[in-house]
Amino acid sequence: MKKITKVVIPAAGFGTRFLPQTKALPKEMLPVVDKPVIQYVVEEAVNSGIENIVIITGANKRAIEDHFDNPNEDLIKNLIQGNKLELLEQVKKISEMARFIYLRQKGPYGNGTPVLTAEPVIDNEPFAVLWGDEFIYSTPPRLAQMKAVYEKFGGIVISGVRIEKKEDLKRYGIADLEPVEDRVFKIKAIVEKPDPDNAPSNLMTGGGYIFPPEIFSALKRIQPGKGGEIWLVDAINLLKEEGVPVYAVEIENAKYYDTGDKLAYMKTVVDFALRHPSINGEFREYLNTVLLAA
């Protein structure tokens, strides 16, 4: 079985739910305390043994490339003059984490299009996909847990997180499951945004994927689905029908952070501020003050 060394990070969306802020700023670059969302995603991949980061970009996404590039000379000079050597090391390490490859998305709308865009650089290997505007915070990293399942079972592996509130099940793709071993399930079907009373489980699947290279052929063979878009789930279902097993791994010690809408994003910022070593104490005091004044 070939080693997984590449992750594809789709980051070509318009971020319409954050306009006007995302008119020029990519939604993936929205800050969570002192790092952009996409850096958390890249760090997860690197901490899971990934060597090559393939970012699928679109219009007005240059800030992503600049962020992961070497720091410019003016910034370096400013940090040295200000004796901010620790900050200098931090910004230098960003570009040294992995090899970064950027491809401009082309083709119809749909979450399958950025995956298909990556085909020329995958070289007929299995690879991972992580979305650039959401992440799962876990120990060990989500992708490391997924890789362990892939190395044992092969097929397609999708990350899963339990949804605690029943009423929230209607927001996600929920899996119909067949147990395989502890925290590993074979997926019989994924029901998109089910009625909570009829949901097949409370395991939300999505956000992280490991695919065999055959996913590209499937994406080319499926017909556009809802809204005329190319949907990744349709390609997954096609491979499943052709005998490729699809597994869900319930991520251990996990918390899912969806930064794709305003409220979820603000909750994410608050959570990470409360665990940030340099501001958590004062920030907690501030929140308590706000709550008492409300």
Image (spheres, grey):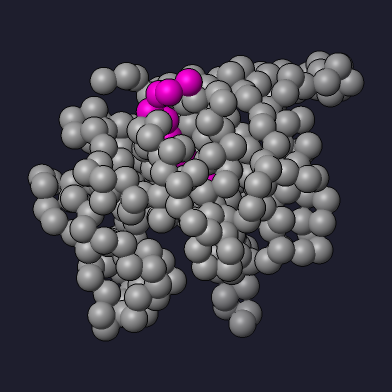
Q: Is residue 168 magenta?
A: no
Left or right side of 53 for 201 = left
Q: Residue at x 53, y 31 (%)?
A: 119
User: Which image quarter is the N terminus in?
Assistant: top left
x and y percentages locating residue 107 in the rendered image: 65, 47
Residue range in magenta is: 123-131
In the rendered image, the vertical position of residue 251 relative to residue 119, given as above or below:
below
Q: Residue at x 55, y 24 (%)?
A: 121
x and y percentages locating residue 212 in the rendered image: 35, 33
Left or right side of 267 for 73 = right
In the rendered image, the vertical position of residue 56 relative to residue 193, given as above or below:
above
Q: Residue at x 73, y 31 (%)?
A: 65
Left or right side of 158 for 41 = right
Residue with the most extreme right position: 74
User: How many marks are shown on the rendered structure?
Assistant: 0
Which quadrant of the structure image shows residue 287?
bottom right
From the viewer's side, name the closer residue of 241 and 91. Answer: 241
Which quadrant of the structure image shows residue 208?
top left
Q: Is residue 220 visible?
A: yes
Q: Is residue 268 visible?
A: no
From the viewer's side, name the closer residue of 106 and 275. Answer: 106
Left or right side of 151 for 125 = right
x and y percentages locating residue 69 in the rendered image: 72, 23
x and y percentages locating residue 86 in the rendered image: 67, 21
